[in-house]
Amino acid sequence: MSFLILVRHGQSVWNLEKKFTGWVDVDLTDKGKLEAKKAGQLIKQEQLEIKLYYSSFQLRAKNTLQIIQKELGDFKNVKNAWELNERHYGALTGLNKDEMKLKLGEDKVHQFRRSWDLRPDPLDKKNPYHPLNIETYKEIPLEKIPDSESLKDTYERVIKFYNEEIKNKTNENILISAHGNSIRALCKHLFNLDNEEISKLEIPTGNPLLIELNNNKISSCYYLDKDRAKDLLVY
């Protein structure tokens, strides 16, 4: 028996401002830092020895993990992986979600946010929000940097990384600090959700999802903060 803990980063500055964030490297709000701190406290109460920690390249996920590790008093074995980054929202990046609902209609914005294989228009490579122009991503091969992504695109990079780097280590307790869409992608794979089910899955910020594994099969799954739990559609 082992445990996989999935944590969406705490509230970010652009979460608060209701902007499509994607690969823009924004930090946590004060509320987001408190969410991460509580996440660490809840994980500590489980009295689990975590062997491996993973985070995306993005500041909000890395800082969430650092705050959690501070609560646990454990800073070992951290691997940052760009494959765990949030979905790239293309030309929607930096735009306000409520304003776009008024401009495009609520149904269209919902399609962009929740559909399986619909990509927004590509983001201009000269745009300062393009990953090519953000220092955080200088280590990523140019051919791997997207202009826009669907959830399907996000799923493919996340699951490739999971299968190659994490799956064969799940006999140990592992914690992943990532993002709404990269965690949704991982949940689609782990829970065998179809394309309609994944469109309904919401991932709360800063609330650890504890998955119990037996021989790589899920035996139980629940959020540690019961008051902020979302419907898992399963278990």
Image (spheres, helix red, strand yellow):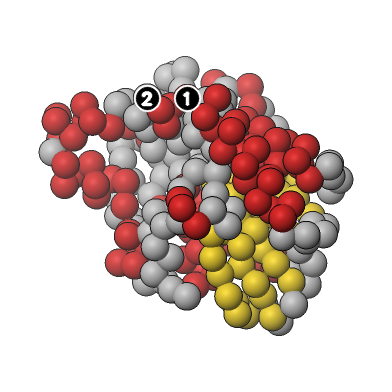
| Residue drawn 61% across the image and 67% down it | 211
Q: Where is residue 184 in the image (x, y as percent from the top left)?
A: 47, 57
> Which part of the image, by quadrant, shows the N terminus?
bottom right
Neighbours of disc 2 within 10 Å: few (<14), some (14-19), many (20+): some
Local secondary structure at mark 1: helix
Which residue type does callout 2 highlight? Glu
Of the numbered discs in the image, which one, if any, rests on residue 153? none
Question: Which residue occupies the foreground of this view, 232 or 146?
Answer: 232
Q: Position of residue 150 (x, y in %)?
A: 38, 50
Q: Position of residue 29 (x, y in %)?
A: 52, 25
Q: Position of residue 231 (x, y in %)?
A: 39, 62
Local secondary structure at mark 2: loop
Q: Can residue 14 be seen in this view?
A: yes
Neighbours of disc 1 within 10 Å: few (<14), some (14-19), many (20+): some
Q: Is residue 156 visible?
A: no
Q: In this view, does 197 lie to the left or right of 32?
A: left
Are the residues flagged by discs 1 and 2 in contact, CB closer than 8 Å? yes
Q: Disc 1 versus disc 2: distance between alpha carbons?
A: 6 Å
Q: Quadrant of residue 139?
A: top right
| Residue drawn 70% across the image and 36% down it | 67
- The answer to whether residue 233 is above or below residue 34 is below
The residue that label 1 is drawn on is 13
| Residue drawn 23% across the image and 30% down it | 98
- The answer to whether residue 127 is above or below residue 119 is above
Question: Which residue occupies the foreground of this view, 13 or 125?
Answer: 13
| Residue drawn 55% across the image and 44% down it | 206
Which residue type does callout 1 highlight? Val
The residue that label 2 is drawn on is 17
- The answer to whether residue 18 is above or below residue 195 is above
